[in-house]
Image: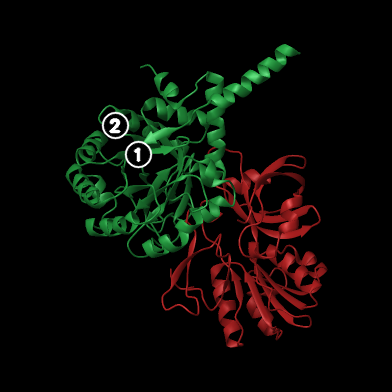
Chain colours: A green, B red
């Protein structure tokens, strides 16, 4: 009886002892989990769970002016994943500052604003507005496969990726994360280029370029023809790229791509990520970001890990 | 903030209504109590290859029971169709705006148009309107085989049926059948394929009415986070068309606001 009680107390102590904090480019998150941009909305996601439970939230890509995005259909399911060709539809920085950000005001979490643009000037215009806002970090999206000019155009060439990074860093008053595309031959070359250009952190991967055909109709499923491939099916690719980039750069890495459970988080941390983002899983299950956090905590307890650093240290090649 | 949930619902009954059309009765007290006409629930498969929820319109909600009628159109709905009484399905609480009934008074008349798998939400709508003291006429169109006609009548609607093939009821569309018999109404509602919604919206405008039409689009999350399912609408007070989310801002829009001929 006493033994049981002591054991129970021990478990409780272990629960208390978990220290999930991580520091990403000088910003302390209470745990290493954020949302992937484009899969989170303060209002809609907040209807399902308490946003304050996450280390950070990453909001949907915002541009200088409203973007209409691509025509419908924009969504197609694939084996263990999905394609989207939303094309960064967003209401523009004014609406973001006046409507989305106030929805996040009462929550105890860090806010990462994902920034979209067609040109360096457009990225910088948004960053200037965000400088004066309450957001904690900026994530520069140079990797959206659904936007031709800008977007992925900057993300596939080390020199251009560096140019964007330098321009943004020159004016940004918040830490800058550069989000990379996997649709390149050598992702380490891009990662090194943005690190050299002053990026404070890197997030990867954005979606992989994909396509689907409706064999009964003989037509492409997406109106935009191609779309970004995400979901559990892409996880091995994402993990491999995080692993490669970790060995190429020193700056913090936010890993993402198909994370669906607590052990997936651990895999990314072991591969070299300092934090992770949950994306498509939140479309399958609206509470996925917090469910995955709880699973990760249970995994840490089961494994006897007290800190995120312990998880990373447990990886041996 | 408005609270939404994902929950497990027990299957009480599942039966074939017509070729490729299933009726599913769930025990889902929270969802059933919250349900309004024109809303939908997300239904999730447990096949890990099929990630996305299937949005399915609410056909009826009574006490703890939620009735969904859906077409078997792909692998997800095929998976649902194989589930039996006693099994559980993951569903969301009701989503979307539903039909706006705030302007309706007792003694008004309503004209409902359902096309194919757009007929099911008309049952709940007819029931709700009848309970409000509205006289309801429902025109239901099908390709070949009808379903839910008895349920529509039981919901208090004067019902007529049209089929493309002429196998049952009028040969032709639900709208042409209703026009043939000279039906009209103070309030127009529709759910069905896009060409039908376009035709109903146009016919309503010709009568000086604005139909409420329920749109469908490929959805990602089904709760407003991913902005995957959009429809171009032009609100009366806006200069430019805007892309609205079908799952969150809809699925019901005013016929006068929707751009039907975009593609």
Q: Chain of mark 2?
A: A
Q: Measured along the vertical axis of the image, is residue B240 above or below residue A91? A: below
Q: Chain of mark 1?
A: A
Q: Residue A177 or A316: which is nearer the viewer?
A: A177
Query: Does residue B130 appear to the left or right of B68 in the view shown?
Result: right
Residue at x-position 61% and y-position 61%: B96
Q: Residue A133, how many percent across, how many down?
A: 38, 56
Residue at x-position 24% and y-position 44%: A156
**Residue B261 visible in image:** yes
Q: Measured along the vertical axis of the image, is residue B48 above or below residue B19? A: above
Residue at x-position 78% and y-position 53%: B65
* Quarter of the image that includes the C terminus of chain A: top left
Labels in figure, total: 2
Tell me the residue that label 2 is attached to: A245
User: In this view, which residue lies farthest toward the left?
Assistant: A159
Q: Residue B195, how many percent across, how many down?
A: 54, 72
Under circle 2, the secondary element is helix
Tell me the residue that label 1 is attached to: A204
Query: Does residue A235 appear to the left or right of B168 in the view shown?
Result: left
Badge 1 local density, few (<14 within 10 Å), some, or many (20+)? many
Q: Residue A65 or A144: which is nearer the viewer?
A: A65
Could you give the CA–CA distance between mark 2 and mark 1, rounded to whole angstroms?
Answer: 9 Å
**Residue B82 visible in image:** no
Q: Are marks 2 and 1 in contact (CB under 8 Å)?
A: yes
């Amino acid at each position: 009886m006493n033994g049981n009680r002591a054991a129970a107390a021990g478990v409780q102590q272990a629960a208390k002892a978990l220290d999930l904090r991580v520091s990403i480019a000088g910003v302390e998150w209470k745990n290493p989990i954020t949302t992937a941009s484009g899969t989170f909305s303060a209002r809609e996601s907040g209807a399902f769970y308490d946003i304050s439970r996450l280390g950070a939230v990453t909001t949907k890509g915002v541009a200088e002016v409203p973007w209409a995005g691509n025509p419908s259909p924009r969504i197609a399911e694939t084996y263990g994943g999905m394609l989207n060709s939303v094309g960064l539809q967003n209401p523009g920085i004014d609406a973001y500052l006046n409507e989305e950000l106030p929805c996040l005001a009462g929550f105890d979490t860090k806010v990462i604003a994902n920034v979209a643009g067609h040109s360096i000037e457009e990225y910088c215009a948004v960053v200037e507005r965000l400088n004066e806002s309450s957001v904690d970090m900026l994530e520069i999206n140079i990797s959206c496969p659904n936007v031709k000019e800008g977007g992925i155009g900057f993300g596939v060439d080390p020199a251009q990726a560096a140019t964007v990074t330098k321009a943004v860093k020159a004016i940004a008053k918040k830490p800058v994360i550069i989000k990379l595309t996997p649709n390149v031959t050598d992702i380490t070359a891009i990662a090194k280029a943005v690190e050299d250009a002053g990026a404070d952190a890197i997030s990867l991967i954005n979606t992989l370029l994909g396509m689907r055909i409706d064999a009964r109709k003989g037509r492409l499923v997406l109106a935009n023809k191609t779309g970004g491939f995400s979901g559990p099916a892409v996880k091995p690719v994402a993990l491999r790229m995080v692993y490669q980039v970790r060995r190429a750069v020193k700056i913090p890495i936010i890993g993402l791509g198909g994370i669906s459970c607590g052990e997936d988080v651990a895999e990314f941390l072991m591969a070299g990520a300092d934090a992770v983002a949950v994306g498509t899983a939140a479309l399958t299950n609206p509470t996925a970001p917090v469910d995955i956090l709880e699973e990760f905590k249970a995994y840490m307890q089961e494994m006897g890990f007290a800190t995120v650093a312990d998880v990373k240290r447990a990886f041996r090649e | 903030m408005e609270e939404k949930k994902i929950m497990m619902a027990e299957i009480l009954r599942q039966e074939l209504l017509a070729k490729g059309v299933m009726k599913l009765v769930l025990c889902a007290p929270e969802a059933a109590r919250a349900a309004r006409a024109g809303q939908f629930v997300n239904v999730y498969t447990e096949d890990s290859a099929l990630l996305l929820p299937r949005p399915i319109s609410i056909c009826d909600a009574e006490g703890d029971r939620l009735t969904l009628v859906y077409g078997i159109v792909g692998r997800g709905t095929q998976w649902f169709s194989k589930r039996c009484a006693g099994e559980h399905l993951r569903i969301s609480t009701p989503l979307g705006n539903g039909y706006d009934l705030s302007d309706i008074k007792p003694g008004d008349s309503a004209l409902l148009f359902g096309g194919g798998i757009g007929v099911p939400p008309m049952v709940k709508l007819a029931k709700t309107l009848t309970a409000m003291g509205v006289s309801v006429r429902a025109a239901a169109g099908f390709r070949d085989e009808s379903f839910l006609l008895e349920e529509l009548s039981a919901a208090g609607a004067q019902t007529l049926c049209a089929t493309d093939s002429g196998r049952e009821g009028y040969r032709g569309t639900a709208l042409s059948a209703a026009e043939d018999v000279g039906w009209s109404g103070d309030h127009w509602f529709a759910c069905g394929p896009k060409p039908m919604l376009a035709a109903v919206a146009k016919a309503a405008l010709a009568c000086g009415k604005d139909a409420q039409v329920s749109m469908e689009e490929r959805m990602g999350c089904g709760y407003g986070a991913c902005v995957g399912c959009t429809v171009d609408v032009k609100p009366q007070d806006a200069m430019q068309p805007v892309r609205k989310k079908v799952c969150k801002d809809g699925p019901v829009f005013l016929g006068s606001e929707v751009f039907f001929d975009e593609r």
